[in-house]
Amino acid sequence: MLILALDLSKSSTGFAYGRPDEVPRSGSVQFGTAQHTDADVGAKAIVWLSKDMPIILGGVPDVVAIEAAWEGNGGHSAQTSALLLGLQFTVAAAALLRTKRQPELIKVGDARRTFTGRAGYAKGEAKPAVQRRCLEVGWLDLETLQADRADALCVWAHIAARTNPELAFHQPRKARA
């Protein structure tokens, strides 16, 4: 089973892919800048998912998992929230057309609980915790460490652990005394 996990954004969409029994590969892609319209961003996302991504993956994924864009809007402006929801809709539709399977929207807290052992963090602590975990398991190093890429790996780990509960990162870490 080939899993593609995405952390969508205009400026840096993180992606992670691989089979649950392999070390995932990852990267990031930019769909636009401040000068691009939402339609420009959506169009680039569709092209990337339908043409570029299958080349990178070496095939069509069996599962596409997208970090859900909406959990109380994350403090985003109305414009940013609209873009993220629109991008999520666009990518989900393109993924459905490409894979013939319904993409999964994954709550960030669920993915974090699977990968780090905790769903909730104090403000400003969640992304560093996910990045630390990526470094611990050897999926990223100091040169490749990037927040959106790490978030995509977190979503990938959630789906991989669901398909194979024996994976080490699936076990919640014990709280430190």
Image: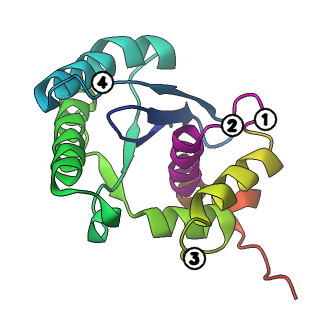
Quote the CA–CA distance across marks 2 and 1: 6 Å
x 49%, y 15%: residue: 56
Q: Judge from the rendering whether residue 23 lies leftward or rightward of residue 56; answer left or right.
A: right
In the image, is residue 31 above or below residue 17?
Answer: above
> Residue 24: x percent and y percent?
64, 35
Task: Tell me if label 4 and label 2 are in contact, CB under 8 Å.
Answer: no
> Residue 130: x percent and y percent?
64, 56
Q: Earlier in the sequence, mark 4 or mark 2?
A: 4
Q: Earlier in the sequence, mark 3 or mark 2?
A: 3
Q: Is residue 145 magenta?
A: yes
In the image, is residue 90 above or below residue 135?
Answer: above
Quadrant location, the C terminus: bottom right
Q: Earlier in the sequence, mark 3 or mark 4?
A: 4
> Element under label 2?
loop
Quote the CA–CA distance across marks 4 and 2: 21 Å
x 57%, y 44%: residue: 147
Choose top left, top right, bottom left or bottom right for residue 169: bottom right
Quote the CA–CA distance across marks 4 and 1: 26 Å
Quote the CA–CA distance across marks 3 and 1: 24 Å
Residue type at mark 2? Leu
Quote the CA–CA distance across marks 3 and 4: 30 Å
x 27%, y 62%: residue: 70
* Residue under numbered circle 1: 141
> Of 166 and 149, which appears nearest the observer?
149
> Element under label 4?
loop
Give the number of the disc on residue 32.
4
> Element under label 1?
loop
Q: Which residues are magenta?
A: 140-160
* Residue under numbered circle 3: 122
Task: Tell me if label 2 and label 1 are in contact, CB under 8 Å.
Answer: yes
Q: Earlier in the sequence, mark 4 or mark 1?
A: 4
Q: Nearer the viewer, mark 3 or mark 2?
A: 3
